[in-house]
Amino acid sequence: MSILTTKTRQGRKPLFWVGLTCSFLLSFTPSAKAKDVELKIGIIQRFGEEVNDKLTIASVSGDSLTLQFQGANGQPQKLQTNQVVLEIVNEPLSSPVLEERVVLSDHATFETAEDSAQRWKALGIQVEVTQPERWQVWAKRSVYQTPLLRRWLLQSLKAKGYQEPYLDSAVVSQKPQAAFKLNGVRYALSQLDITTNTNQVRLTDQSNQTRVYAGNLRLQPNAYGTYTLVNQVPIETYLRGVVPYEIGPGAPPNATKAQTIIARTYALRNLRRFEADNYELCATTHCQVYYGLSGTISKVDQAIAETKGLVLTYNNELVDALYSSTTGGITAPFSDVWNGVERPYLRAIIDSPNQVWNLSQQSLADEAAFRKFISLKDGFNETGRNVFRWNKQSSIERLNADLKKYLTRRKDPSANFNTIVGMQVTKRSPSGRVLVLTVQTDKGVIELYKNEARSAFGPPQSTLFYVDPIYDANKKLLGVSFVGGGFGHGVGLSQYGSYNLANLGWSAEKILEFYYPGTVIQPLNDSIVFWKEEKP
């Protein structure tokens, strides 16, 4: 979602807001109900995947760390130090242990995984959404606790025609054990709480990157047999480590304010993402990029202060505040990218302050119209950006490798093909997004839906593309050109688009109204619904 990490309802305004200028709106002092909610951010999600994983945690100058954990005797222990090095030791088990779960479905994104979870729940199956690598829906482990129950569930589903679920099983004879040494004594950990007097701590991660984080840290087990390092931090402080990296240090002030309101809204609406692992958000583009206090910028801090507590709502519920770096000239409705209930405030909007294309007369579902649209380069909010338009070529060897890897991760038997012999977009949405990419292999046809078309192949930077085959003189397929625009899912606010609108003099309120029509900015209060479970 981040500009700096580019490499995952129609409604009415309350009369109170009518006629307010944006300068007044964004200098509005939130009420006492605009709480500084504390978040739990998984800043290191898979500590222990490698036996040489190591984290160094140190206090800032003049402070010390307080370490609290359960000792070998089961009694709570408290130690103080200036630095601790967390390591991983593979501990042998007294006897092998069966670790398994029923994987009901596998997805590229949380949004589609959550929709799938709702559909399984409608069948009476208790589930949990997880992210061992891709997002998955598991039969809830605390319910399907025994091998017999898990196999009964799987056999029942197969008998009813459900082919996607499978049993993910492994017999393990050792497990990663987190530990640290202090004053010559080694302490094994199940959980570790780290606090300081200044509420600041310095972390050096596995890649030797050092950052300072506000708040407290907790090392805790996750659902995959490893550990997660969780940063407990107030939301307004959290934003100081998000907004500079998401919108970029060169963003115009009103673009920064718009991003701040959206980032705050996104965080509060998405607190359920990692419920299976007992934390709330991650620190990567699967959520929002979060790097703590190391890259704070005064003008961003000012935008955070001026918008404190302000969130974007629709019908008094936090909006699904999705955004991407570059839309490619048109925003996408929610259902163009993910499965799930449509969000009426997430619509197909030509990303321009001017009339450069009339969607009502020329739907981009038509292939010829789409190709004409992609050939346009001028007059858009993102004109001139290097990912606004692109042409990425890939050889048949690379395409084969990409697709085999993708299908293997999904445990799809179609991965046994030898070579791709053709590829075409067979269904496109009115906003131009790929809904179905059909791939012909020597073993049969594979259909890739929505965002999976992007997940399966390396070159496409969005689902806003068309495919041109590259043949040799004998009409043998040598490769493919993916020709398209944008970077990311293209739903909601365009970060680069907001730059242009802000430079044109648009207020943060007007920018958000453009990308999320029918929504309302208001201070966080107890009446606002963070998230409402939606039935499929």
Image (spheres, rainbow, N blue to C red):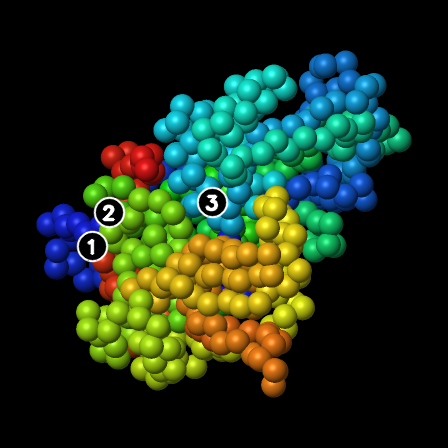
Q: Amino acid at mark 3?
A: Phe
Residue located at (51% from left, 73% from top): 482
Which structural element holds mark 2? strand
Which structural element holds mark 3? helix
Q: Amino acid at mark 1?
A: Gly
Which structural element holds mark 1? loop
Q: Residues within 10 Å of mark 3 (few under 14, many from 20)?
A: many
Q: Residues within 10 Å of mark 1 (few under 14, many from 20)?
A: some
Nearer the observer, 450 or 235:
450
Q: Amino acid at mark 2?
A: Tyr
Give the Cα distance between marks 3 and 2. 21 Å
Compared with 495, 408 (above or below) is above
Q: How many marks?
A: 3
Location of mark 2 (residue): 314
Which image quarter holds the C terminus? top left
| Residue that protrudes farthest toward the right in the picture | 184
Location of mark 3 (residue): 110
Residue located at (84% from left, 26% from top): 92
Q: Quadrant of residue 419?
A: bottom right
Find residue 333 and report its horizontal and vertical position in percent: 32, 57
Q: Nearer the viewer, mark 3 or mark 1?
A: 3
Residue located at (27% from left, 59% from top): 347
Give the Cα distance between marks 1 and 2. 7 Å
| Residue 20 horizontal side relative to residue 112, left or right | left
- Circle 1/circle 2 CB separation < 8 Å: yes
Location of mark 1 (residue): 518
Q: Quadrant of residue 172?
A: top right
